[in-house]
Image: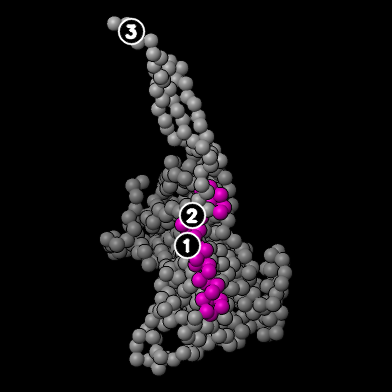
Amino acid sequence: GRKSMRRRLPLYKEERWEGVGGRRGIARKMEGDPHRYTRYIQVGHKRKTSPGGPLAKAPRRERIKDKSRSIYQALFLRGEGSDIQIRALGEEWNLHRVYLCQAGYFASMFSGAWRETHMNTIEIQMPDENIDREALHEVLGSLYRDSMIIPPCRVVAILATASMLQLDELIQQCREIMKDTVSAQSVCNYYYFSAENYGLQDIRTICRQWLLDNLMTQRNEELLMEVSLDLMRELIASSDLLVMEVEMDIYTTLKKWTFLQLQPTWRGTRRALLPDANSWFARHRGESEGAPFLETEQGRAFIPVFQQLRLAYIICDLPSALIIDQDALIPAAWLTPVYKEQWLALLRAEQTKEIGPVDVYVSDLQGNSMRCGGQLQRDEQCSWRWAGFNFGWDLVVCYNNRRIVFRRSALNKSCGLGVSLLWQRKVAFRLRLVSLDRNGRAIFRRDTEYQMLSLRKDQELEVVNLENQDVVFPLYMACNFLYIPRERGTAQSEDSCKSPES
């Protein structure tokens, strides 16, 4: 038969499409066409999901935030639907029991057999002077919203209020803020109130370490004014105090601090502080007929602090000994036994032929060791000498290629007490390295712990290797040294420091 001459109609496949700006339509694609011809038919715009335009619906988080803000404004600020009134610090808040019960303080009050359980108006007496009206307002308001922003300058007042109302989450938020904001302006305030009043012992420990790292390195007059007598006594007594230079610098710091405690209205430049302090003590000495300052009525309160000075490491240097004598802050009755003890120790060190094992207990090192230090400004080779300390044991400290090396110098150079030429010396030591950020917080710390150093003449010992460590400069280096002459019949203790191989 004849083939059909009727034309075959093309077949189309339809697909829906959506375009930019909400346009939508149907795409018809011709099947069997080698060019895959496509025809688009626009059928209109996509319906808007909200008056604000396509996809203008607010995210869930924003809707929750808006709802929280509305609740805060309506219920807390305007007091709509209030069923209880709180009165404190001369103010009134119209609030709601269901929200107040989030605080342990109110939850116990409303659920127990208390007089206030069924009262509509409750007056609260503030047991803590750190709580003010603003802090109470903010903390009560936090019960009506999801989050609260706490400025560091207000964290102690907020912490005090949160502790009284027993809001554990808010207390934890205050703890984290305090950890991150310890500085010269806040450290004393945090230290005094964190542990004693609110049980945040970890904050007190952080603040104490900050003060040990920065008291001698920052040279901040405002900070010295805020350090109390008890706190200063604790810091000066510690072998962890980061001392730059030598023990005499601790005495100088104490002299400035004492002057600022007695003259809190002093306002002057940093350079003028020490001369002004010296002038004040000189006038006081004249008015007291030459009596040592610590034996006067004004000075007796400072005795516990000055007793923590390690005078044995001050009087071995002639310029320092002359300043101590001229200032007359410290009574002669304190100094005479120290001079005698150091003179006998020097004789034993130079006239004892045998240098054997030495028992050195950690308690001796912590309470009696010499404190000194220096600063590495940049990662470059440098060296310095601590000459004449420990009865002529001349030590050279070298920094090179991220290594710190101790070398005993036998060169007979002019220095305090001369240079000892004895063939061997044993000295207990500890080396600490600390890098601080601009707020005084440690960003690098390294501690060798206590050990024995035994060097012959011109012998070296690598103490610290900082290769492959992320060290930030400037780098503070603090050392503790203790030399104890050997006494016959002394046995090596299992708890004492061990001497490394020479």
Q: Is residue 302 left or right of residue 196?
A: right
- Residue under numbered circle 2: 59
- Identify the amino acid type marked 2: Pro
The answer to which of 458 and 210 lies nearer the viewer is 210
Residue visible at 67% across and 78% down in the picture: 263
According to the image, label 3 marks what residue?
Answer: 3
Q: CA distance from mark 2 to mark 3?
A: 65 Å
Q: Is residue 193 visible?
A: no
Return the mark for residue 64.
1
Residue 202 is situated, as x and y percent measured from the top left of the image, at 42, 68
Graded by Cα atoms within 10 Å as few (under 14), some (14 to 19) or many (20 or more), the crowding at tag 2 reads: few
Q: Nearer the viewer, residue 254 or 352?
A: 254
Q: Is residue 423 above or below residue 252?
A: above
Total residue callouts = 3
| Sequence-wise first label, 2 or 3 | 3
> Residue 281 at x, y = what percent?
67, 77
Query: Could you say which quadrant of the image residue 216 lies in?
Result: bottom right
The Cα–Cα distance between marks 3 and 1, rounded to whole angstroms, is: 73 Å
State the CA–CA distance, disc 2 to disc 1.
Answer: 9 Å
Tell me, yes or no, whether the two marked residues, 2 and 3, touch with CB atoms within 8 Å.
Answer: no
Three-letter amino acid code of the residue under disc 3: Lys
Please, which residue is most extreme toward the top here?
A: 1
Write the start and end of the magenta stretch as one range.
Answer: 51-80
- Confirm whether the magenta stretch covers residue 71: yes
- The local secondary structure at tag 3 comes to loop
User: Residue 354's x, y, as percent?
Assistant: 36, 56
Say how the picture is coloured. Answer: one colour
Nearest the eye: 239 or 326: 239
Instruction: Report helix, strand or loop for mark 1.
Output: helix
